[in-house]
Image (cartoon, rainbow, N blue to C red):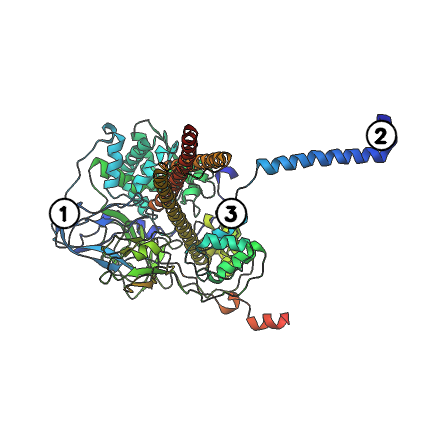
Amino acid sequence: MLELIANHGILAAILVLLGLALAFGALLGFAAERFRVEGDPVVEKIDALLPQTQCGQCGYPGCRPYAEAIGRGEAINKCPPGGEPTIAALADLLGREPEPLDGEAQEEPRVAYIREAECIGCTKCIQACPVDAILGAARQMHTVIAEECTGCDLCLEPCPVDCIELRPREPDAWHWPRPELIASDRHDPPIIAGAASR
Amino acid sequence: MSRRFDFPGGITPPGRKAQSTREPLREAPLPRRVVLPLTQHRGQPAEPCVAVGERVRTGQVIAHPQGRVSAALHASISGTVSAIEPRPIPHPGDLTAPCLVIEGDGSDEWTLMPALDWRATDAETLHRRLAESGLVGLGGAGFPSQVKAGLGEHHAIDTLVVNAAECEPYISADDMTLRRHAAEVLEGARLLAHLLGAERILVGIEDDKPEALAALNTAIAASESTPIIELKVIETRYPSGGENQLIRRLLGRQVPSGGLPADMGVICHNPGTLRAALEAVRDGRPLISRVVTLTGEALARPGNVIARLGTSLAELLDDAGLDRDRLARLVMGGPLMGQPLARLDLPLVKTANCLIAASAEELPAPPPPRPCIRCGDCETACPVALAPQRLFAFAQADADDKARELALFDCIECGACDYVCPSHLPLVAQFRAAKDRLRHKDAEARRAERARHRYECRQARLEREAAEKEARRQARRQAASRPASQATPRGGADGQEAVKSLRIARAAAKAALRKAERALARASDADAATLADLETQRATAEEHLKAAEARLEMAQAQGNGQDDAQSSTEERP
């Protein structure tokens, strides 16, 4: 047997390659079992890019379900609270073409506000809030924990007396302004850039 | 000096300290009215504990600290609280902020805390005393001192550095403090070294302060031998007074990017802070005044004064002979890192170490910026070895993430790059804006993360409620069906399988809960928002566990029910 292999170089090569294939196959099989990841890691990454308002404007009941849907091939332009930056980040992650936003872009972060004098204490908004940001009890006045509110507007619709409204979120702090610069240093004139590409 | 004991770059601008060091330290006149902003420190604003109309005495606490990083506030004159309202404060955005206003009665009646001998007092009392006295870093950063004094708990501190470098032009407050009170500064250093468990005190001072150096030498010679006090004279170069730069020059230790001096076993304190700490303990005197340098060509009598906090800057400068016609720029702090002030009716705050009333010739407005010529001078000057010209280009193009990759957050905003730039580009202003944008973005990301955790917690709760409801329904049905013994038996093996997988799910949920609890315990001294977020995650894990248990019980009850039903059918003939 050994003599046969030694005499036929091609046989030795095939046997060696076969052996390697089997060894690595076994190794990969073992690794796949041993280091198996539960769930889809891409969904986690997509979920981390979504704004987590849990507003359902994408047609899914929350950001996580939408992330799962994107993982299955759903369009990436259905998140109005995230707007263009989220679409760009998703396109970057998934290697897809960025599409224009499907829906109306949200200008600024908002929070729900309950006009407390009008609230009748029905608890319907509490049940609707996806992040438990409304505080109250039956027949007691309710209020929004502004710090936790994502501005998803899901509490507006169930309110029987329409006492909830969305207000712009209070800006968190003063920010350092961008220094004034001369025009030529700011960016290339767009007209020239357009002419060059044509 | 070896390269290990030096930082790269740096600049040597004209010192201009002589004009404010000619006259000895003097007391500023007692103000008629003080305006005390509730935020004169890093961290949370203090919470007022006096009402409008209440009479207060000098040194009485008027606002308590809130949260871990915060500082108390004390009345700096005796009189009546006349208002608690937003007033203009020294701020780069020229903003208003809540302030306490005290109308003085001119009597300056004091109320002091009991005096303590720090050598005979336990550490806990001393820490509490530092927190009660509203001490903050007087060098300009305004970090609450009790937080820094408590760092010895989690870090092994071997050296306390007294930062007497005072490298920025014009400022001479620490210099004058040391000339007059060197012994007290060293005693304060001993107190803090004792609290931190540091066995060595290192005084770092630049060689342009011979008088302060002489005073320090005398004080060290007269002092006791333990702990060891060492004096190191370094050559004058800006910014040796930067915490990390000074540590590098004195000890040859390099504080890592994003790290703290405490990670390298070092704590830095300003001489003024050390003296205030000693006074707070030895005399029971809270922080109600500070040494401030009044200088600039628009002043007839420049010098250093001990001024009560909350004194109007106009009053202080007028006392030093301000010529309003010559005043072109008013700067709080030094000319490189200080902030320009747009008005005079602002109060003196704890972090104001210097006021420069500059004439137009003295600190001329920078000429209009020209495009970057990539000369690399800023790179040579940068004491942190960054590439300012690249950071600037990225920050300007809104590529903030790229700037972050180039260690934007290691920039100490010293202004050396601005100083050397031949195109007069506003480099530091651009970096500050970019840092701010990044911080805002991070805050938004944390907010989204918190919302996600709260959403998950709610989902888990709803799931648990559904599982428990189902379990109860099942139990009721079984109770109702047992007498009739019409339980529809399913495959026993199938049930066994379900119970097994539910057991695994329960074990996983239990492990998750334990992990969340451990994370919560580890982060016990994190800020409130982080704690709340971790608590939400723990609650989520708990809900998952409860749901798993409810389902498991249900499955087991079902299994037993079947067994019961089977056994009862067997018993029956």
Q: Which residue is mark 1?
A: B57
Q: Chain of mark 1?
A: B
Q: Which mark is residue B385?
A: 3
Looking at the image, the residue that sits furthest to the front is B573
Name the residue at 59% across, 36% down: A33
Residue B393 in the image: state x and y as whole percent: 52, 59
Judging depth in this view, the residue of B45 and A131 nearest the camera is A131
Residue count near mark 3 (Cα–Cα under 10 Å), binned few <14, some 14–19, many ≥20: some
Pick the residue in front: B440 or B304.
B440
Mark 2 neighbour class, 10 Å CA radius: few under 14, some 14 to 19, many 20 or more: few
Rendering quarter of residue B99: bottom left
Q: Is residue A143 left or right of residue B210?
A: left
- The verdict on a common chain for dots 2 and 1 is no
Q: What kind of residue is marked 3?
A: Ala
Say which element carries label 2: helix
Are circles 3 and 1 on residues that touch, CB within 8 Å? no
Q: Given the image, on which type of amino acid does mark 2 rest?
A: Ile
Residue A118 appears anywhere in the view:
yes
Near mark 1 (Cα within 10 A), the count class, few <14, some 14-19 or many ≥20, is many
Residue under label 2: A5
Viewed as shown, does residue B187 lie left or right of B204? left
- Gap between marks 2 and 3 measured at Cα: 64 Å
State whether discs 2 and 3 lie on one chain. Answer: no
Question: Which of pointers 3 and 1 lies earlier in the amino acid sequence?
Answer: 1
CA gap between label 2 and label 1 equals 104 Å
Please state which of residues B109 and A144 is positioned toward the viewer in this rendering. A144
Secondary structure state at the residue bearing disc 3: loop
Residue most toward the right? A7
